[in-house]
Image: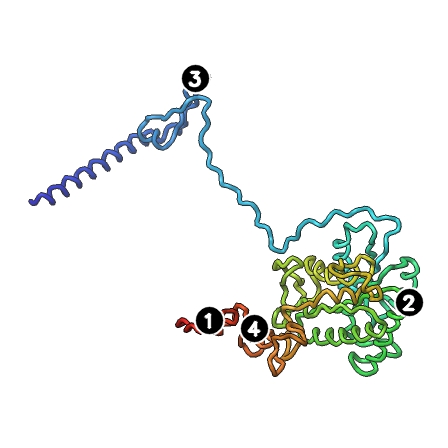
Amino acid sequence: MTPLESIATKLKRCMVLSLAALAILVVVGTEDSSATPFVPPKPLIGSNIIQVQGLFELLFGRPRTRPEGSRPTIRTRRSTPARRSSDSAPAAPEAVEKVETARNVVVIGDAMGSGLSRGLETLFAEAPDIVISNRTKPGSGIVRHDFYDWIAELPAILAEDNPAAVVIMIGSNDRQDIRGSDGAELRTQKWLGIYEGRVQNILNQVAARNIPIIWVGMPIMRSSSYGQDISFLNDLYEQQSNRVSAIFVETWNRFADADGRYNSSGPDVNGRARRMRNDNGIHLTRQGNLKLAYFVEQELRPRLGEGRIVAAIEVEEYSNVSFDERRDLLGVEISLTSPVPGIGSPVLTGADSPQEDRRGIGSGARLADLGTSPIPLTGRADDFSWPPPAMDVGGVDSPPL
């Protein structure tokens, strides 16, 4: 027998003997199984040692001990704090008490207008001299007079609230036929004539009081067919607003993605990605209403005498210029999602910019449309002509590049 076989045989014998000993202990412990079941002994009162029974004690009869007063280690699962949703909004600013002479901003419209009103209330919560009056009626519209007649109810609202400005957002329920004796099918010529007349009536009632009017268009919709009708109504609202010099706030593109398509999420007023639309693809979430209210606020504050700061402009020099015109002198607002300016556009370069070449192509349009670098200016960092114009080589040979 080889040494390896001898070692293997000895190991097998040890294992057999160990298993046999363990079996004898188990049989001895269960011989009296018909008697009273085993009950672990209770600790002696007043003793300094507390006996602890476990599997080790049952098999080998050697109880482990621990000092009296010590506590066993208890393993607890660490609770994980709830993850904050990305759509959760920061706490709304604490509302301040409004003064008696506070100016009243009246918001009229349907459910979309109601959400806008709540957003404006949040944005103006810290303004003691501005009150937002929610006069909206969810489910209402301009088509149906049987549910709520805005033309008939508006005079009483204007007389009671005496608004300093009126904000209108309505139309999400007007995608239907006009009923009654003068009924008409949606978007027919007859329907268009009746509907335009009602929109004009609402605008005329407010304009007759010389009150600033802000009409807010509807945002992009998830349903393409529904969105086409809403886009049609937005064009009508903008045309009629311009007729009475009212401000029309465009929201369609501001709630679309970079490709102009519907997106349920988007950047909030702070640039963070948030959920903007409800599951129905029509109404806005709280964050969406705050974003909507932000665009309206930019047009509303100047017309309430809380205009933006006109920095670096001498007011006396432009004393004969209206506030809105002075604001436009500060600069040009460039949208990051709008189509790039066309060739020769002065938006990025200016009409008389030295960056334009003989074809009138500015540097911004050259980069966006043609994909080529701007024409370098003499002496600028991107001017790689040699020798440099500022260097006087004095007849010395130019060093090799």
Q: Which residue is mark 1?
A: 393
Q: Amino acid at mark 4?
A: Leu
The total number of labels drawn is: 4
For label 2, the SS is helix
Residue 104 picture quarter: bottom right
Quadrant including the N terminus: top left
Of residue 71 and residue 112, the one placed in the foreground of this image is 112
* Left or right: where 329 falls relative to 377: right
Circle nearer the N terminus (4, 3): 3
Q: Is residue 330 above or below residue 359?
A: above
| Location of residue 259 with respect to 315 vertically, above or below | below
Q: Secondary structure at mark 1?
A: loop
Judge by depth and name the residue closer to the eye, 70 or 374. Answer: 374
In this rendering, would 52 be left or right of 154? left
How far is mark 1 from mark 4, CA to CA? 21 Å
Determine which residue is flagged by label 3: 47
Is residue 101 visible to the viewer in this orientation of the structure? yes
Q: Crowdedness of circle 3 by 10 Å Cα count: few (<14), some, many (20+)? A: few
Q: Nearer the viewer, mark 4 or mark 3?
A: 4
Amino acid type at image mark 1: Val
Disc ID at residue 152: 2
Observer-nearest residue: 371 or 185? Answer: 371
In this view, which residue lies farthest toward the front?
A: 394
Q: Please provide percent x and percent y for residue 360.
A: 63, 81
Question: Amino acid type of disc 2?
Answer: Ala
**What's the CA distance linking mark 2 and mark 1?**
86 Å
Between the C-alphas of marks 4 and 3, the distance is 97 Å
